[in-house]
Image (cartoon, rainbow, N blue to C red):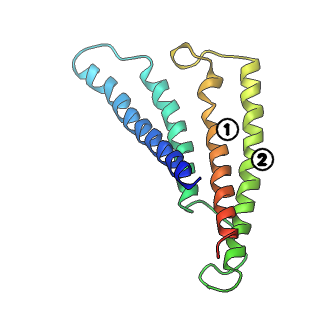
Amino acid sequence: MSKLWRLWQQTLNVILLIAFASMGVIALIPMFSRLMGLTGFSWALPATNQLVLWLAMLGAVLASRRSKHISVSLINTSSRNMFHRLRHVFNDLVAMLISGLLLWYSILFILSEKEYPADGLFGLPTWIWFCIIPFTLFNIFLEHMVHGWLEWHKR
């Protein structure tokens, strides 16, 4: 399982890298085309806007994986006492609860967008572009579930 999990994490890292590089290139295209006297690309700004959303959500998965997200700790984090493992499991459970609720509501959002579709970037419905939200929230949920499980069963 750990090899499969690492492969999944690396895949998400590659998607994040591709999205970041794409945003940089797409943001520069209109500037260089105007310098050369060409007309701008009408899709560049909406594409950049979508990539910002994708980068923010994928970055949240990465931050969650590295424990750089906002967390609530009732026990002093600097102390190494017998509650250390319990504290981490509790934090993972809270993060799972919050990301699970956000996942549920993001699915409802996608369903409502699908019910009343609007054309988005490249003629695709907007709900397709917004599917990154439940996708990443599900990944955050999985990150905390796996981390909590491994922490709980640590010897």
Helix, strand or loop at disc 2?
helix
Q: Is residue 11 left or right of residue 101?
A: left
Q: In this view, does 77 lie above or below 120?
A: below
Helix, strand or loop at disc 1?
helix
Residue 97 tag number: none
Q: Are marks 1 and 2 in contact (CB under 8 Å)?
A: no
Which residue type does callout 1 highlight? Pro
Q: On the image, which quarter does residue 35 sit in? A: top left
**Would you call the spot at circle 1 few (<14 residues within 10 Å), some (14-19), or many (20 or more)?**
many
- Rounded to the nearest angstrom, the CA distance separating label 1 from label 2 is 11 Å
Which residue type does callout 2 highlight? Leu
Q: Is residue 20 left or right of residue 140?
A: left
Q: On the image, which quarter does residue 154 sit in? A: bottom right
Q: Residue at x 74, y 61 (%)?
A: 93
Q: Is residue 54 left or right of residue 141?
A: left
Q: Is residue 80 left or right of residue 31?
A: right
Which residue is denoted by mark 2 in the rendering?
A: 101
How many callouts does the rendering have? 2
Which residue is denoted by mark 1 in the rendering?
A: 134
Q: x and y percent of residue 88 in the render?
A: 67, 70
Q: x and y percent of residue 126 in the render?
A: 62, 22
Q: Is residue 19 above or below residue 10?
A: above
**Would you call the spot at circle 2 few (<14 residues within 10 Å), some (14-19), or many (20 or more)?**
some
Q: Residue at x 56, y 57 (%)?
A: 65
150 vs 45, nearest the viewer = 150
Q: Which residue is drawn at 57% across and 63% down?
A: 67
Q: x and y percent of residue 90 in the render?
A: 74, 68
